[in-house]
Amino acid sequence: MCGIVGYIGKSHCKDLVLGGMQRLEYRGYDSAGFVFVNEKAACLSYLKRTGTVANLAKELSVFDEDGFSGIGHTRWATHGVVNEANAHPHFNCKGNIALVHNGIIEEHESLRNELIAQGHKFLSKTDSEVLVHYFSSLFDIYKSVKKATIELVKKIKGAYSIVVLIEELPDQLLVIRHNSPLVLGRQKKGFFVASDVIAFSDKVDEFAFMPEDSIAVINKNSIQLLDFSGKSLLPVWQESNLAFVDVSKDGFEHFMLKEIYEQKKVIDKIVNFYRLVGTDSKLSASDDLGNALKYQLDIEYQDRIWQQLGLSLKTVKNLKKINLIAAGTSWHACKIGQFFFESISNIQTSVYLASEFCYMPFFKEKDSIFIFLSQSGETADTLQALRLVKSHNVPTVVITNVPSSTMVQESSGFLPMQAGPEISVASTKAFSAQQSILFILANRIALELEKITLQEMKSAEEDLFMVSQVLEMAIENYKWEISNGLAEKYSAYDKYIFLGRHISYPMAMEAALKLKEISYIFAQSYPAGELKHGPIALIDETTPVVLFSALDEIIYKKLLSNAQEVKARSGHLVVFAFEGQNELIGLADYAFVLPKVNPLLAPLACTGVMQFFVYEITKRLGRPIDKPRNLAKSVTVE
Ligand code: F6R
């Protein structure tokens, strides 16, 4: 993971780099470091600190020296504990070459041993430090940055984006990209490089994504881009109209709370964005004519959505299999989406965990597509899975919140999630957005395959509008009780079991993930039917069992039996149920009761109040809610 920012040009670099680092903190926030060519001393000056960029910036603000070239790094530890020695930048033995790295270097131990045998002294436990020592020894041999870099990339394996600053070449930044994103930016006064364009989007006139396996040598006036064999490449510059939206908490105590409350707006926006073109007035003015006219417009719109997805109409019409791939919360959204595609579009659907997918045999299936879900569009596991599928010439579709992300650049097509920036590390509104888009997509495919009528498509959209209201209303209904006693009571337990069945099982998985990642309370989810096959041994009054109900009658009855099994063993039962499910509600020690919705949207209806409950429990425990320990917003290592 980690975030990298570099600047070289005619302006002082300190504030520019620190500003960019602050915007990249979502990639890691356990330590931060900054190095620059000190204009007064004509040498490399640096500062590294554990903790946030703000921490580092505070100390640097009293340090009045600056320079015209500098690099910064925000760390998410992979190799070596969180301390100043392991924070970046790392240096060669003479201390005159500084390097920052994002990614993982494979087999770094053997290279480290080779270098130690040659007399190199290591100060950190990181894989990254081998890069600077090795580069330094190559630079000593070849006396050429380019030659040394070409030799370096021949030797190292893994994933890396690297920026290097060399004291004797103060007017130059060396940048290397392999399997880890980097983007270049240019303005009249200089150049930027960063892990994500948002680091400098409002400061440059143009930006260019560095191609995979490329090297950039940047000086104050120009950039030279090369491939790994040293051949020149042309950067593809794009105009930067990506103003940086400085997202604030808008008076909320945490971003997570703000984002929980944004969900109604996000779902409504998604329905409006993706809804069929045409006006209801046409329908009501003359129903028959209106319908006919509208249908023509819809066909045009349908074509557009498939174009955006990079799918031909023929591919959609012939679809026999849908594969969904993601990680974490996005994977839970896929597990819910599977029910949409199978029951609405009547297409067999498989869901894969991105981190497992690449290590399983790949079976190429005719008439199949792969859909990758990722809030960030940068998750390394999902990106690797996408690359693998792409190498088999199978259509790859990405649904992401970040249109400038690597996944969008590499896929055949994408749908924007429309959720707006999600700042809190724990995903909330992205989860709702993903469920909503998958629901719309399943209906769109069904419409194309004539499995549903236009009218049914319209009522699916109305169902989503309705659920967005239920989601918000449920938070409002339970807000007082949760904040005045319930959260306090439930923050005292140190372990939880979450149960669900059918479409409510992924919801139980998501609730368990949410609770453990922000509160650090141990939480385990199970399909409720599996309880009797082992986990039932864990049931006692000290472990609350949280059960998510479903609106399918058969599934509800089965869940009811599972709830009875819990109560029969003196378990403490909390349920998320729906109006009319009185038997289940009666069994519970506490019940959240929601209005009935389209059964496929039951998880979405429960999403907001579940997140609010978890948020309030966590607040009672005094945890850093928006930035939980050990995590990062964008997981760019495998
Ligand atoms: C949990 C959470 C993570 C992410 C996962 C995938 O709240 O945010 O589990 O869902 O790391 O990230 P994306 O969706 O960016 O690929």
Image (tube, grey):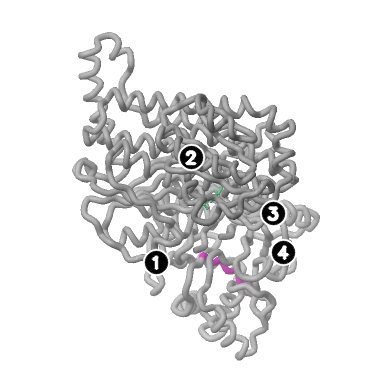
Q: Secondary structure at mark 1?
A: loop
The residue depicted at 49 percent of the width and 59 percent of the height is 182
Sequence-wise first label, 1 or 3? 3
* Residue 56 in which image quadrant: bottom right
- Foreground disc of the pair 4, 2: 2
- Foreground disc of the pair 3, 2: 2
Q: How far separated are the C-alphas under marks 1 and 2?
A: 35 Å
In the picture of the structure, the residue carrying the numbered disc 1 is 359
Q: Is residue 162 highlighted in magenta?
A: yes
Q: How far separated are the C-alphas under marks 3 and 2?
A: 48 Å
- Foreground disc of the pair 1, 3: 1
Q: How far separated are the C-alphas under marks 1 and 4?
A: 37 Å
Extent of the magenta region: 161-168
Q: Position of residue 284 (x, y in %)?
A: 30, 10
Mark 1 touches mark 3? (CB < 8 Å): no
Q: Please give the label number shown on residue 48.
A: 4
Is 335 positioned to the left or the right of 609 in the image? Answer: left
